[in-house]
Image (cartoon, rainbow, N blue to C red):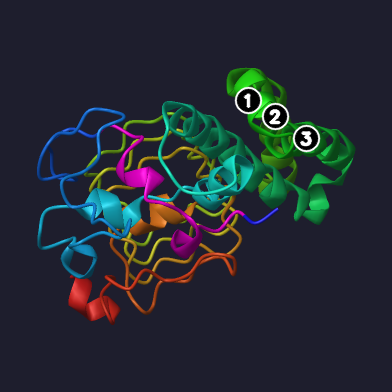
Amino acid sequence: MNLAADCARCVGLCCVAPAFVASSDFAFSKPAGVACRHLAADASCSIHDRLIPSGFPGCVAYDCFGAGQRVVALFGGGGRSAEMLSAYDTVRQLHELLWYVADALSRPSAGPVHGALAQARSAIEAAVAGGPSSVEAADPAAHRATVAPLLRRASALTRGRGPEHRGADLVGRDLAGRDLAGADLSTASLIGTDLRGADLRRADLLAADLRGANLADADLTGALYLTRTQVGSARGSADTRLPDRLPRPAHWYPAASSAL
C-alpha cells in the first residue's frame, strides 16, 4: 500500500479536513472542515512555493501518509463531502500506523513479533481497502491498541540496551555530540533541542516532537519510526544522515556549518 502523498491525485483534503491554530507553525487559525484561504480552485496551494516565509512551516512538514489519494479513490472522484473529510481523518491515522508497522517489519532483529505485526497490518489494510462503509466502521484507536505493544517489542529487540528517555522533557537541551545510539526517545519532547552531531542510530523516535530540533550532522541511520513530518519540522543539513526511506527536506541547510 502506497504511504507516500500524491497531491496530484488528491483534491486538497489536507487543506480542509484538519484544524490548525495560529502559532509558529501556522500564520492564522482554521477550524476543521473549513478550507484554508490559500486553497486554490484547482485544489492546489496558492502559496506552495513560499510556505515558510508566509508563516506556514507546519504545512511544509505535514504528511498525510497517502491518505488523500486513497480517500479520493475510495469515493470515486473529486469533491470534499463531509463523509470524505471524516474518512480522510480515519485513513490518515490508519496509514500512519501502517508506516510504523512497515518499519518494524523491516527490522530482522524484530523477527519474533513479525507474525503478529503482519496480522495487524492485514487487519488495517482490510479496513482501508474495504470501501467507504468499511472506513466509517474502522476504529483507529482499537488498531493502535493492538499495534502499540508490538512496536515497543520490536523497538526493544532492535535497539538493544540504549539510553532510556521515553517521554522525557528535553526541550531546548544541549545534546550536541551525545551518544544516543539505540536510545528510547519515543514520545520525548525535543523542541528546539541541539542534537548537532548526535549519534541517533537505531534510536526509537516514535511520536517524538522534533519541531525546531537541530539535526545538523546528526546520524539517524536506522532510526525507528521516524516520519516525514518529524524530519520536516526539524532543522538539518546536507550532513545529516537519514534512514533510506526518508527524503531530505528541501528547506534544510546545505551544510552543517550553515546551521550553527
Q: Residues within 10 Å of mark 1 (few under 14, many from 20)?
A: some
For mark 1, what is the residue?
144
Residue range in magenta is 3-19
Name the side, left or right, on which 136 lies relative to 219: right
For marks 3 and 1, the one nearer the N-term is: 3
- Residue 190 figure quarter: top left
Q: Are marks 2 and 1 in contact (CB under 8 Å)?
A: yes
For mark 2, what is the residue?
147
The vertical placement of 156 against 46, above or below, is above
Asked whether residue 11 is drawn in magenta, I would say yes
Q: Main secondary structure of the magenta part?
A: loop
Name the side, left or right, on which 208 lies relative to 121: left
Total tally of numbered discs in the picture: 3
Quote the CA–CA distance across marks 2 and 3: 15 Å
Q: Which mark is residue 126?
A: 3
Nearer to us in this view, 70 or 75: 75
For marks 2 and 3, the one nearer the N-term is: 3
